[in-house]
Image (tube, rainbow, N blue to C red):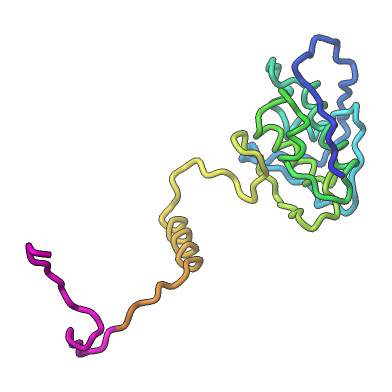
Amino acid sequence: MPYSHSVSCTKENDEFESKVFNTNSNMCSQSDTGNSFNLPVPTEERLIDPGTISEEERCIHSEFFEGRPAKTPKRYLKIRNHIIESWSQSKPIYITKTSVRLGLKNCGDVNCIGRVHSYLEQIGAINFGCEQVRYIRPLFFSPNSATVLSHPPVKDKPSVEQLMAIKQARTEGMRQRKKKLFPDFWDPLDGEGGYTIKHSADG
């Protein structure tokens, strides 16, 4: 049965004391592109301490740790812990981004919640063992996307080779159009069409 508990993120006046950063994580190595991360493919379900935020998480979800009023470490923990709790309640049924968003009112936009879900899925903290999961390596987290990508986002104009490859892939994916074949000799009076019907003024 899917987890239906709702978390509200509108009030954040209370002191945030459970923010504990684990600096011993070396699993996150940011590449030269600035958004690529080399993480090992999980071999077992990963358990996460609900009160701890690792360096890996701070590295990947840096938007929550830059002092923004709408995206705070406390809000990140609420989102992350709600998604993990949803998985523990529905296990082994796959939880989607849409299903976890239903319980996160005013906790962030669709994309940021989606990125947290994607990260937790890719490290094996949620949906581990579900056939719908595909582990993508290396990971590229785009700030405008709700998911992880298998390639860095294209910022520059694609090269001629890239355009030709895209065109070729589209052509191969298209269904062949059937051409109507006509005989070499076509008689319009053989009953197969070709007539133009004119009506007189009388009808």
The quarter of the rendered structure image containing the C terminus is bottom left
x, y (%) of residue 119?
Answer: 76, 41
The location of residue 200, given as percent across then percent down, is: 8, 66
Say which residue appears at 90% left-offset and 26% top-offset: 51
Q: Quadrant of residue 164?
A: bottom left
* Residue 187 point in image, percent of width and height: 18, 88
In which quarter of the view is residue 147 placed?
Answer: top right
Along the line of sight, which residue is nearer the eye, 94 or 4? 4
Main SS class of the magenta portion in the image: loop
Q: Residue furthest left?
A: 201
Above or below, comparing residue 89 to residue 5 in the picture: below
Residue name at image x 66 percent, y 33 percent: 110
Q: Is residue 84 above or below residue 195?
A: above
Position of the N terminus, as image quadrant, is: top right
Q: Is residue 195 magenta?
A: yes
Q: How many marks?
A: 0
Magenta highlight on residue 198: yes
Q: Residue at x 74, y 33 (%)?
A: 102
Q: Relative to residue 159, is residue 102 drawn left or right?
A: right
Quadrant housing residue 55: top right
Bounds of the magenta segment: 182-203
Q: Position of residue 34 (x, y in %)?
A: 64, 36
Q: Name the residue nearer the viewer: 131 or 31.
A: 131
Query: Which residue is pictured at 88% across the width and 36% down the height?
Result: 85
Left/right of residue 184 with respect to residue 113 in the rendered view: left
